[in-house]
Amino acid sequence: MPWAFKENKPIFQQICDMIVIRILNGTYPMGSKLPSVREMAEEAGVNPNTMQRAMSHLEEKGLAITNRTSGRTVTTDEEILKRTKREYAVAAAEDFLQEMKKLGMSQNEAVSLIQDIGGEKK
Amino acid sequence: MSDLLSISNLTRTYGNKKVLDGLDLKIGTGKIVGLLAPNGEGKTTLFRLMAGLLTKNDGEILIDGQEPSEITNSYVSFLPDHYVLGGFHSIRGAMKHMKKYFSDFDEAKALSLMKRLKFAPNQRLASLSKGQKEQVQLILFLSRKAKLFLLDEPLAAVDPATRDFIVQTILSSFGEDNTVIISTHVVLDIELILDEIVMLKNGKVHLQGEADELRSKYGMTINDIFKEEFRFVEGGSENE
C-alpha cells in the first residue's frame, strides 16, 4: 500500500491513519516490531519529525508501545485494537451514509444496497 | 536554549531598493524549513548574507551564536542556485576540493550517492548535462556534516525521478542536530518534507509557522496558501 497524501489535511494525522490501517489489516501484526521513524519517513517521503509525531500519537492511543530492548512494537492489547477498528469502521460508514444521503437515498435503501452488493460479490 | 539561527532587523539594499527591510527570523535545530517567496523577494540575498558572501546594511545575523565568517562557514553548507564547479576537471577533483576546505565533508557518503545516480568519480564535469552537473553539486554540498544547510532552489531544474532522489538525499542528510533551509518558489514538490514554513514578502517575514498547523488553520495545502498570499504581488508569482 503506497503512502498517498492529501496535502490539505495535517500530514501527521494522515500518517497516523495510514499506520492504524496497516495495523488493523495485519501489515504490521499485533506485537510485531515497527520500522524505525527514519526508515518510515524515508519510505513515505515525509519529514522525520512529522513521522515521530505520528508515532507518539499512536503511543498515546495505546496502539504502539516503546520498550527499551525491542524498540517500538504494535500493541498486543486486543481490546484496544477492537475498539480502534470499530472507531475507523464507524467513521467510514458515516462517510458512506453521508454520500448516499447526498444522492437522495434513505438509510434503509443504503443498507440494502450494501447487502445487495455484498451478495453479488459472494 | 538558543536558536541555531537568529536574525534581527536585517537590512540589505540594492541602490534604492530595500530587498531585506528589517527582517527578523529565528529558527531552531532539527527542522526542515521551507523559505518560500516568489522570485525577487530576497531569498537568495538572505542566503548569501548568511553564507558571508554579501555584507548587510544593518541588523544582525547569528548562526550558532556567531556572525557569518570563516567560523560559521565551517558548519554552514550553502548550495547556490547556480553551478559553481566550473573550475574543476572531474568529479574527483571537485571532491578533493571539498575535502580540503571542509573538514566535515563525508567522502564515503558522497561516493555512495554518486554511485546511486551512476556517476563515476573520474567522469569529466564538462561531459555532463546541465541537470547532471546540478545533481553532482547537490551531492557534494549535502555530503557535509553541517549544522545548517542552505539550499537555494535545489529543485528548480530537475525531472520528477531526480526530484525524488533529491528529496530522499535531503532527508538522509537531515537529523536532530542540524537544520535544512530550502528556498523555493515551487512549493508543491517539497511540501511533505517541510516542518516549518517561512514566507518572505516586502523584505520581511510575512508568515512563519509549522506546516501541519498552517494546513489545519487554512484548510489548504501549503502550496495553496502560498498562491493565496502572493496572488497580488506586483509582477506576479510564477505559480499563477
Image (cartoon, coloured by chain):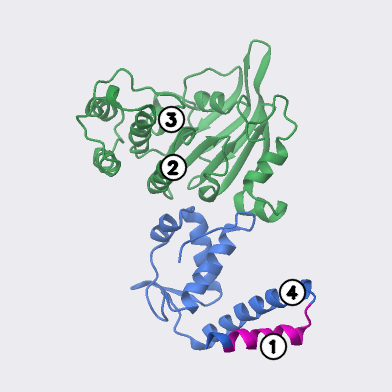
Q: Quadrant of residue A83?
A: bottom right
Residue B202 position, x and y percent, is: 70, 27
- Name the amino acid, label 4: Gln
Query: The magenta stretch spans which residues?
Result: A105-119
Q: Quadrant of residue B57?
A: top right
- Same-chain status of marks 4 and 2: no
| Residue A112: image tag | 1
Q: Would you name the residue on which mark 3 appears?
A: B78
Q: Would you name the residue on which mark 2 appears?
A: B163
Q: Would you name the residue on which mark 4 appears?
A: A98
Predominant SS of the magenta segment: helix
| In the image, farthest residue toward the front | A120
Q: Residues within 10 Å of mark 1 (few under 14, many from 20)?
A: few
Q: Nearer the viewer, residue A64 or A40?
A: A40
Q: Does B81 lie within the magenta span?
A: no
Looking at the image, which residue is at 61% across and 49% down?
B210
